[in-house]
Image: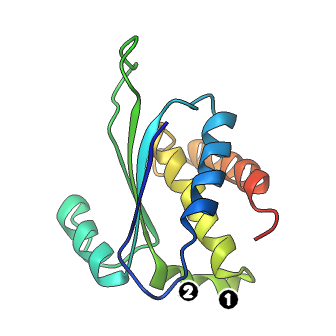
Amino acid sequence: MAIYLSNRQKALPIKSANIRRRLARLLKELGLSEADLSVTVTGDESIRDINRQYRGVDKATNVLAFAMEEGEPLPGAPRVLGDIVISAETIQREAPPLGYTDGEMFYFYLVHGLLHLIGYDHEKSPGEAARQEAETERLWGLINHGL
């Protein structure tokens, strides 16, 4: 398993060891202990540019996920799940009104993005949205202690 982290912002303190430990726990829980992925923490301007370029949406967002796999993985090939991009500035705006710390909100969006990488899509249907929300809450609960 390889977890690549890139911190391109200064608004939110990032503890790489904590992120790696929690991601390893999530991947193990999902049966993906050998999978690779990358996480980039950035600001609103950068995530807005990415959102505009790849989704045609000209606004900042909390998290974007870019899956690398399509269909069934090849036997014996390394699993590269994809990339998660999180905006620290959006987290800092969204966390207080919801009653969460910045750290809790960061890990919520990390789980949310990871689920997108493995095929969950809350935009498909209300049923899929409920399924993703339930799995997000379950996994977030596994890693949210001690934040």
> Which scheme is used to colour this image of the protein?
rainbow
Left or right of 14 on screen, residue 25: right
**Residue denoted by label 1:** 96
* 132 to the left or right of 118: right
Mark 2 crowdedness (10 Å alpha carbons): few <14, some 14-19, many ≥20 = some
* Residue assigned mark 2: 92
Residue contact at pointers 2 and 1, CB within 8 angstroms: yes
Q: Secondary structure at mark 2?
A: helix
Residue sitting at the far right: 145
Residue at point 35% right, 15% down?
74
Mark 1 residue crowding within 10 angstroms, few (<14) / some (14–19) / many (20+): few
Farthest-out residue, left: 53
Could you tell me which residue is drawn at 64 percent across and 52 percent down?
21
Residue 27: quadrant of the picture: top right
Q: Please provide percent x and percent y for residue 112.
A: 56, 55
* Foreground pick, 59 / 129: 59
Residue 110 picture quarter: bottom right
| 139 in relation to 95, above or below | above
Of all residues, the one furthest to the front in this rendering is: 17
Q: Is residue 12 visible?
A: yes
Going by the numbered disc 1, the residue's amino acid type is Pro
Of residue 60 and residue 35, the one placed in the foreground of this image is: 35
Q: Residue at x 76, y 62 (%)?
A: 144
Q: Amino acid at mark 2?
A: Gln
SS of the residue under disc 1: helix
- Image quadrant for the C terminus? bottom right
Can you give x and y, in whole percent of width and height, for residue 126 in the image?
58, 48
